[in-house]
Image (cartoon, rainbow, N blue to C red):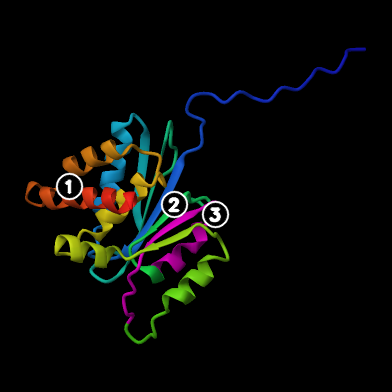
Amino acid sequence: MKKPTKKTKPVKKAGEQKNFNIVIVGTGGQGLITLLDILARAAKIQGLDAKTSELHGLSQRGGSVEVHIRFGAKVQSPLVTKGSADLILGLEMQECLKAAYFAGPKTNYLINKNITPIPGREPLSEEEITKNLKRLTKKIEVVNANEICLKELGTAVVSGIFLLSLAVIKKMIPLEPETMLNAIKQSVAPKYLDLNIKTFELAQRIAGN
């Protein structure tokens, strides 16, 4: 009679490590596609595989927009599955509720304190939104990115870049800040580059306070 052999745990092969999953939500005109491009470039600069999807939403001005990016050693699908988002980046607070499908107990939310009125509906308050999100995860941070950028840079148009830079600098995203800055330089049109570099530097100052 053969002795039972001891079972060993399978060794993870290269490319089987957990991918990092990000969902970005907002409204048309907030530059979500640019943020997606910057993230994908940054991941590839660091030698990672990255896949993106912008199929979940309509990018017309004011309409809901939802984009996904997954990066790691090897990514098979660009779509983040239910409850598996590592980070949900919200450029508009109410849109974060729509992305709750992707949140789980370990999900980080980094949210712009920005509520856009919906025609014919009473907008939800910040307290109502965060209360609902806390049913899924306690890791919620709200930043008044619009106000900070308007005060320090004279425009709120770069609030998405500010929020993304803050997420990297605060280590909510496993990419190097220098890599992110290089990706910004490669993605942004020359006439807007100086403003975007200043936005990244502003995020560094705010994160250091």
Question: Where is residue 91 shown, x and y percent of the image?
Answer: 33, 63
Residue type, numbered disc 1? Ile
Question: In the rendered image, which residue does mark 2 sit on?
Answer: 87
Q: Give me the residue at 35% from left, 45% from top.
A: 168
User: Relative to 37, does residue 110 appear above or below in the rendering?
Assistant: below
What number is the disc on residue 83?
A: 3
Q: Earlier in the sequence, mark 1 or mark 3?
A: 3
Residue placed furthest toward the top: 1
* Tag nearer the camera, 1 or 3: 1
| Residue 27, position as x, y percentages in the image | 30, 67
**Distance between the Cα atoms at labels 1 and 2?**
23 Å
Q: Amino acid at mark 3?
A: Gly
Q: Residue at x 49, y 24 (%)?
A: 14
* Residue that mark 1 sits on: 197
Q: CA distance from mark 1 to mark 3?
A: 34 Å
Residue at the location (25% across, 67% down)?
147
Taking the view exactly as shown, the residue that stands out farthest to the front is: 209
Sequence-first tag of 1 and 2: 2
In magenta, the rendered stretch is 95-118
Q: Residues within 10 Å of mark 3 (few under 14, many from 20)?
A: some
